[in-house]
Amino acid sequence: MATAIPCGNTVVTGLRPRLLSSLNTNKWRISQARVSTEIGALSFSSSSIFPQNLTHLLFNSWSPKIPYHHLARRLIVKAARDYYSILGVSKNGSKSDIKSAYRKLARNYHPDVNKEAGAEQKFKEISEAYEVLSDDEKRSIYDRYGKDGFKGSTMDMGDFSNPFDLFSSLFDMDIRNRGARNMAADGEDLICNLVLTFKEAVFGVEKEIDVSRLDNCTTCDGSGAKPGTKAYTCTTCGGQGQVVSSSRTPLGVFQQVMTCSACSGTGETFTPCNKCGGDGRERKSKKISLKVPAGVDSGSRLRVRSEGNAGKRGGAPGDLFVVIEVIPDPVLKRDDTNILYTCKISYIDAILGTTVKVPTVDGSADLKIPAGVQPGTTLVMSKKGVPLLNKGKMRGDQLVRVQVEIPRQLSDEERRLVEELANLKKTKTLNGSRR
């Protein structure tokens, strides 16, 4: 039985080379040792014709027990399958036949679907065959010269596209083309500013704002076409909504898919509406009631869904984003959810202590200053701050910083009393040191 022997990129079957058939077995007697020597001389490590393990295979397969007339066997070389047989199409097959065959085989042998051994290699062969046969110039060269026709040219056989990119571009394009005619476009989002007072931002408020936006055209009902007319297939893209441009480079052929500029990707052209100019939308002003939650600050953004520009061809409308700007309060300052205030008291009140009126966002409130308070001390008024956003029952604090004022000028009576106080302080200090 014949045994297959790998020989470079070919497969050799039949273990008795034809050169032995010319030997007259009656006149020539070749010893087993001599055959081993002759064949071993050809088994160089760098040879692609006779690998080193071929000697042992040939020698052992030729047994003296086998009659010599059976040694006259032919070397059979199995050539690699051509591109037409890989795709299973005839040499006269049309581009449609080639594309259909590729799509069917590529789906079956894609590594993500087919986990069998050799599926990925088969997928690459299919992609390589399709890339050549789907291109008229490459196919012509291949039909005349085979794979050798690409050697030494700018279209070298090593310049094939990534088979997975080829697969994705083909199938993605089909998906896009199927939806081209009904390609909807969502409306754009809008942004507007809203100015609030300090207290409105703290406690929240309900406002009514005017928004200028694009709404569906009342004349064409958003279609963009003149009433009474019909849309027809775009002649530029053939109704696909996209055009493909190809460019040949030393690295291969590059294809770029772009939205058709004639029909804006819809695949259809029509007589535009006189009112909206074919856009399907017209500008209108609308009053929108907006509820601002308590605790917003400058830079806060409120989102009002579906109040932006209308979509095209049935697309969803955009959203309206309202950016808050708060007018600062001249007295109260805000630090996140806390409110800061500076309270000025006299040095006498700092020594003796007092109760003062302090402004808050809730109105005026009493604050007790303890006796002996030091300059720069911060007193806390609990839950007099800003409500936490979306948590109205939780509030920050108002932080009051005490600032003690020292008079620059004193009356004679005030100076006499301060000096007496100073002398009294000195006397107490001396008596304390004597003890």
Image (cartoon, grey):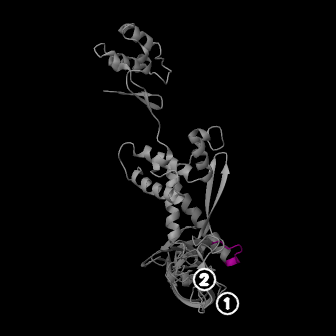
* Residue that badge 2 annotates: 194
Image mark for residue 18: none
Q: Earlier in the sequence, mark 2 or mark 1?
A: 2
The quarter of the displayed image where residue 412 is located: bottom right
Q: Nearer the viewer, residue 147 or 311?
A: 147
Counting the numbered discs, the total is: 2
Residue beneath the point at 37% across and 23% down: 15
Q: Is residue 153 left or right of residue 363?
A: right
Tag 1's secondary structure? loop
Tag 2's secondary structure? strand
- Magenta span of residues: 405-413
Alpha carbon separation for disc pair 2 and 1: 35 Å
* Residue 393 screen position, x and y as percent: 41, 79
* Residue that badge 1 annotates: 274
Q: Is residue 2 left or right of residue 368?
A: left
| Viewer can see residue 232 | yes
Three-letter residue code for mark 1: Asn
